Image (cartoon, coloured by chain):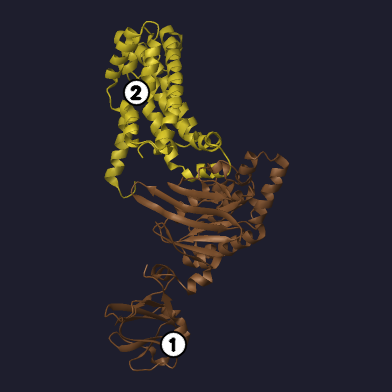
Amino acid sequence: MKGRPILGTLAVLGYIIMIVPILFVVSTAFTAGDALTFPPQGVSLRWFGEALAYQPFVGALLSSLQLAVVSTALALLLGVPVTLAIQRGKIPGKSLVEGLFLSPLVVPELVVGLALYQQIMIGLHQTSFVALLVGHTVLLLPYAVRVTGASLALADPAVEEAARGLGATPLRTFFSVTLPLLRPGIFSAGLLSFVTSFNNVPLSLLLQSRQFRTLPVTMLDYVQQSYDPMIAAMSTLILAGTVVIAIVAEKTLGFAKIFGGINK
Amino acid sequence: MTTAAEFTGVTQAYGDTVAVDNLNLQIEQGKLTTLLGPSGCGKTTTLRMLAGYITPSAGTITINGADATRLPPEKRNLGMVFQSYALFPHLTVADNVGFGLKLRKVPATKRRELVMANLDLVGLAHLADRKPKALSGGQQQRVALARAIAISPSLLLLDEPLSNLDARLRVQMRSEIRRIQGETGLTVVLVTHDQEEALEMSDTMVVMRAGKVMQTGAPATVFTAPANRFVADFLGYENFLTQSDGSLLTVRPEHLRVAAAGVVPTTPGLTVAAVVRESVYRGVDHIVTMTATDATGTPITLVSTTRRDTLTADAGFQPGDLVTAQARDHEIVRLTSEN
């Protein structure tokens, strides 16, 4: 930052814009009063207790976790072989195939959601969980393909050839060399997918049902009806969870390694 | 001679580009053969076809007399050392070297023994438990060598193994590889673009250009009697003179002497009138570039290098000086073909 005053100021400004609203939410969560106001009145954990005792939130949290875990697993199971085919296979029109798998990033989620609503829920009479699972998996596929792809692109293909030369069949090479090399990439893709699914609103809003509703949608619903510090407490709990995930990621891999590959 | 591997009419084409063109080549058992040539000459493609990473478009490759043209790499039992070393980053040095042995179901104790013996061979037994990342480039190279040798391969293939090392280490590794080849009796095929490396290390060198073999032979033969202009040029011959009968002569720059115009040589040989264009001091030697015309009237450039310690006092030629360039008969190489 030294010698670059404009850049430095902008960076600090950026941090302020990002962090200050979060500080407001977190501090009001600890209020002892009844209103969602700043500054908070007194300090207490009462709203955390209320949030964790509020059945719709707890149920929705479990739904969200379930959806995020299963859709992440599906996205990885589909995305990793796709990445391998794109990076290592001899398929014609590689960039076209890759573009196809990245397209969910640009197609409006409402369009995807509507299509799934019509075809899967109305057409095939499936539950909203099935529709959401399909929707989220599609949504997460670009992350799975891109992030594992970036880590595979950085790996020397000669390493796999070396394994073959030493006597390993293609399958053996995949499990004893390629997969271990991909592990950090798969881990970061999984993390990113999990967070993306967990925070998703458009798809989850469109495909919700009385039986299955995710946490962000439930919270949105709650805010529209009542405005009390419980919502701030729930937000703070989610934030804490996210920070824990970030710390785990940082300890095991380092942020630079996780996010360094995305824009490559 | 016993043939360890043989290429018969092997062609490798990618679309319109022919990387290897109707190659016929025999690799002699127990010898070190180098494939030498500039980038794009097809030497690496040739090695990769031998290893099984590329399937030829046409022709056959046999290893130990058996057809291996379409055999996948894992069934060839060849040891390959890659330019990038290609060590398994998630495995220790010992597990890297033991990788092929494990696949061959060698029991753990026997495996450990073989791993240590092979690491000993390259002088790295003390680093067995390190990860490749903790090793220097030269050490990684030795591990890659040990890993390739550990499986007792029928051939050891080296793809530009020294090109990522610094100059001093590179020279050291040349004799190291020769020593290992001597101790193990392995048949080695080495790919390089470095003529010095090929001359120093080979039993047989194969000079390639644009997918074709230009010349095959012992280094001393190829060096002193290059088959054509390309080989001569690649091996450092710089003076090419077309004779009136159309034949081509070539002389190495260190064999071409410069004398003042009109000086008649005492030994029979070649004398060409020339004009000095440039005269440059280079430490070990002194290089004089001259302009002349050959017997067909075509302007040519002649280059002479003279070692400083043999330089005579009157050798201080200036640009523009009229001189004669001279070479003795036994220093003149007659090329049989232009290409």
Residue A45 locus on image (x, y percent): 45, 15
Q: Secondary structure at mark 2?
A: helix
Q: Residue at x 61, y 43 (%)?
A: B100
Q: Secondary structure at mark 1?
A: loop
Compared to residue B274, the image places residue A238 above or below, namely above
Horizontally, residue B60 falls left or right of residue B303, namely: right
Whether residue A64 is visible, yes or no, is yes
Q: Amino acid at mark 2?
A: Phe
Compared to residue A152, the image places residue A226 above or below, namely above
Residue A212 locus on image (x, y percent): 40, 9
Chain in brown?
A: B
Q: Which mark is residue B289?
A: none
Distance from the alpha carbon under mark 2 to that under mark 1? 86 Å
Which residue is labeled 1 in the image? B311
Give neighbour class at mark 1: few <14, some 14-19, many 20+ (Cα, 10 Å): few
Image mark 1: chain = B
Horizontally, residue A197 falls left or right of residue B83, namely: left
> Chain A colour?
yellow
Which residue is labeled 2 in the image? A24
Q: Residue at x 42, y 34 (%)?
A: A85
Image mark 2: chain = A
Give A200 or A142, whichever is nearer the viewer.
A142
Which quarter of the figure has residue B270? bottom left
Compared to residue B170, the image places residue A181 above or below, namely above
Horizontally, residue B5 falls left or right of residue A85, namely: right
Residue B284 locus on image (x, y percent): 45, 79
Q: Amino acid at mark 1?
A: Leu
Compared to residue A11, the image places residue A222 above or below, namely above
